[in-house]
Image: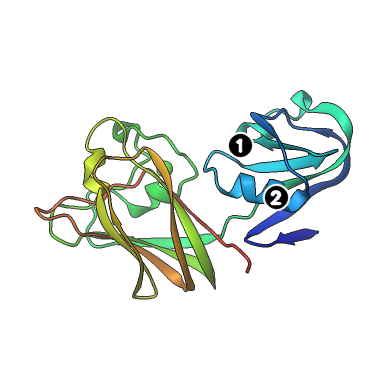
Amino acid sequence: AEVISPGVQFTAARTGSAVAPPEFLARIEDSEIGCGIACSHRSDCFGFYWLLGACRLFDLHAFFNLDAWVSIGTCDVFLREKLPISTCQESSSKVPCSRAIDGVANQYYHNLSCSHTNLNLNEWWEASLTTPSLVSFVTIYNRLDCCGHRLNKFDILVDGSVCNQVRLSAPFSVSNFSCNAYGSKIRILSRSNPAEPVTICEFMAYKIQG
Ligand SMILES: [Ca+2]
């Protein structure tokens, strides 16, 4: 059960559901497709449902407590489709690269859920997808306890080709970065000079169907 809309891929988690998760945002959209696009533009949107012209976006917590789902009318509940990541690598390891894909988005390094390379020019972190795919954009959770500026300058590469050159003037906390390249290896390559380590607290990749 999959619904493809222009620019977005979502999976129908519940079809014809009598209950739906509480939303964090409701907005007017004239179609399910428009609702999906609205969700895809927000890193905090985990899924959506659309009913009688109202598009309702919900976050990850919607699935932590199914008892909190509300009766709103029969609707289809869609979830954003994440690309499965099988393994990771990094240019050097102060701590394991896998902390960036452990499913925990905690952004405090000392909580042991952020990756960390050593300190050299051009350090990198890389995810391997289980199967090659169009990588439309990636979501990065940056370190928050300090040092967010270390990810101000980096390139995103898919199978060795640069798909985005990120050059920020201020650190981000959580952000989506577009890519639009096909492949299976997604690399975050530091372009900081002087050198900075690469630390990623959580990494996700998403496919968008054309
Ligand atoms: Ca993590």
State which quadrant residue 17 falls in.
top right
Q: Which image quadrant is residue 160 in?
A: bottom left
179 left or right of 110 in image = right
Residue occupying the point 24% across, 62% down: 91
Total marks in image: 2
Does the beta carbon of the residue at mark 1 sit less than 8 Å from ligand 1? no
Q: Is residue 17 left or right of residue 59?
A: right
Q: Amino acid at mark 2?
A: Gly
Spatial distance from mark 2 to mark 1, Cα to Cα?
A: 20 Å
User: Which mark is drawn over residue 60?
Assistant: 1
The correct choice, above or below, for 184 with respect to 170 in the image is: below
Q: Secondary structure at mark 2?
A: helix
Determine whether label 2 and label 1 are within 8 Å by CB. no
Amino acid tagged 1: Leu
Instruction: Classify the position of ligand 1 by quadrant: top left, top right, bottom left or bottom right.
Output: top left
Examine the image and state in which quarter residue 1 appears. bottom right
- Furthest toward the left, the residue is 194
